[in-house]
Image (spheres, rainbow, N blue to C red):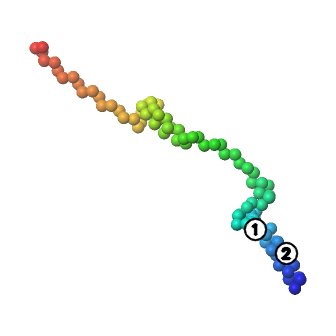
Amino acid sequence: MRTKRLWIAGAVLALCGTTGCQTWFGGLTLPSGRYLERHYPQYFSPDPDFPLQRELASQEDPEGAARRAGGGGGVVPAPAPPAPPVPAGH
């Protein structure tokens, strides 16, 4: 009976050692104390206040942004109509 318990305890310990680096404690899944050995902390630069900078620039200055971008999306004004002919008698 005692050898069976020791065998089960050894199997449980071996299984715990091969399951990875997470543990379940009190309803939470937590990393083990060795999680920094292989996975170093990474730095992510902060995001800008408004992530679409070109859209923000076009909203702040719609005509200027269209001209700087090449005028591809801007509204082109229609040419002025020709002046009517002036009568010769006046």
Q: Is residue 12 left or right of residue 69?
A: right
Q: Which residue is mark 2?
A: 10
Figure quadrant of residue 71: top left
Taking the view exactly as shown, the residue that stands out farthest to the left is 89
Q: Earlier in the sequence, mark 2 or mark 1?
A: 2
Q: Quadrant of the N terminus?
A: bottom right
Figure quadrant of residue 80: top left
Residue 47 at x, y percent in the picture = 60, 43
Q: Is residue 33 visible?
A: yes
Closer to the camera in the image, 85 or 63:
63
Q: Which residue is mark 1?
A: 19
Q: CA distance from mark 2 to mark 1?
A: 14 Å
Q: Secondary structure at mark 2?
A: helix
Residue 58 at x, y percent in the picture = 46, 36
Q: Amino acid at mark 2?
A: Gly
| Residue drawn at x 41%, y 36% as measured from the top left | 72
- Image vertical order of residue 17 relative to residue 44, above or below: below
Q: Secondary structure at mark 1?
A: loop
Crowd band around label 2 with a 10 angstrom C-alpha radius: few (<14), some (14–19), many (20+): few
| Residue drawn at x 13%, y 18% as measured from the top left | 87
Residue 68 at x, y percent in the picture = 47, 31
Crowd band around label 1 with a 10 angstrom C-alpha radius: few (<14), some (14–19), many (20+): few
Taking the view exactly as shown, the residue that stands out farthest to the top is 90
Q: Quadrant of the C terminus?
A: top left
Q: Amino acid at mark 1?
A: Thr
